Amino acid sequence: MPATLLTGGAGFVGLNLAEALLGRGETVVCFDRRPPPAAARRALGSLPGRLVVVEGDVGDAAAVGAAARAHGAARLVHAAAVTAGLERERRDAAAVARVNVLGTLAVLDGARQARIGRIVHVSSGAVFGAAGFGPEALDEEAPVAPETVYAVTKYAGERLALRAAALHGLDLVVARLGSVFGRWEHDSGVRDTPSAPLQAVRLAEAGRTAVLPRPGWRDWVYAPDVAAGLVALLDHPRPAHRLYHVGSGVRWSVEAWCARLAARFPGFAHRPARAPEEATVDLYGDRDRAPLAIGRLAADTGFRPRWGLDEAFEDYLAWRARHGTAGEA
């Protein structure tokens, strides 16, 4: 298989995708402003593929193109992004836009210069914003109404990616991700709010109480399933569509996750918040987004999520037992 250039390769989603590709014996060029955590480099180095780490800025099209040419990358996954919380929005919205919007344009320019083939541009279900709270699952044609700086810039990024594909004949698909959690989630400096399942795990390990603003029903998707969906889009010879949702297709609650943690950690408890400011778990706003429909991805690629609530819970706790907090470094 050809080498794959992975922007944001030292991030949460990037490490899971690198792990999947390296496990197949492929070469992965991890392009990021910082190297992967030491624990990740050790784990990835034990896999049959070849990991190449290139430190660079996604705003530098020439550097992206040079990295691709130097290491023979014929495919690219653009996963680099700043997932901004409220404080970063207030403090430095321009920096978020520089990475998520201008960085996307630069990466695509570098890919075009290097004559890269398949490009998967990673977007987010956050683009649905205010339009994402209805009773029905959200398919790829559902209207969007992004509200936060992160959501607005991710929607702009995916539209610019699709326009660049049309202008330059790029072989590009957009992958909108659901609410991801699991292996290799760490404090990368560009992802301000950890997933709710990780927040609860950290509280359980510390023997503290998880105070929930509401049960937290979402189509939580385990990170290895996200990697599998992205690999399916990389591999498909002729995708029928330009836009796909990558998610779990099922909903479960953070409350149910906490109940399982309570059975495993005797010092841990969880309860509803009596007032919003009392909550110790952040559920990203005051409502739960409708699930992403994944029928298009399933029909076109054969993708089927592997990890339900119970399977993901057991795997993630076993993974943390192996890696500990080094997996979050």
Image (cartoon, rainbow, N blue to C red):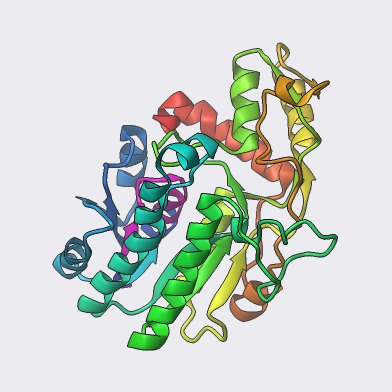
Residue 74 image offset from top left, x and y in percent: 28, 74
Tell me where residue 213 sits by quadrant: top right
| Any part of residue 25 in sight | no
| Any part of residue 79 in sight | yes
Residue 328 image offset from top left, x and y in percent: 44, 31
| Residue at x 43%, y 37% (from the top left corner) | 91
The quarter in which the C terminus is drawn is top left
Tell me where residue 165 sits by quadrant: bottom left
Residue 185 image offset from top left, x and y in percent: 49, 39
**Residue 95 drawn in magenta:** no
Give the mark count.
0
The reply, left or right, for residue 134 in relation to residue 196 is: right
The quarter in which the N terminus is drawn is bottom left
Residue 141 image offset from top left, x and y in percent: 68, 76
Tell me where residue 134 sits by quadrant: bottom right
The reply, left or right, for residue 41 in relation to residue 225 is: left
The reply, left or right, for residue 183 in relation to residue 284 is: left
| Residue at x 65%, y 28% (from the top left corner) | 200
Residue closer to the observer: 158 or 329: 158
Residue closer to the observer: 74 or 153: 153
The reply, left or right, for residue 311 in relation to residue 134 is: left
Q: Please tell me whether residue 58 is drawn above or below residue 238 in the rendered image.
A: above
Residue closer to the observer: 278 or 224: 278
| Residue at x 65%, y 63% (from the top left corner) | 145
Q: Please tell me whether residue 57 is drawn above or below residue 120 in the rendered image.
A: above
Q: What's drawn in magenta, residue-wise?
A: 5-18
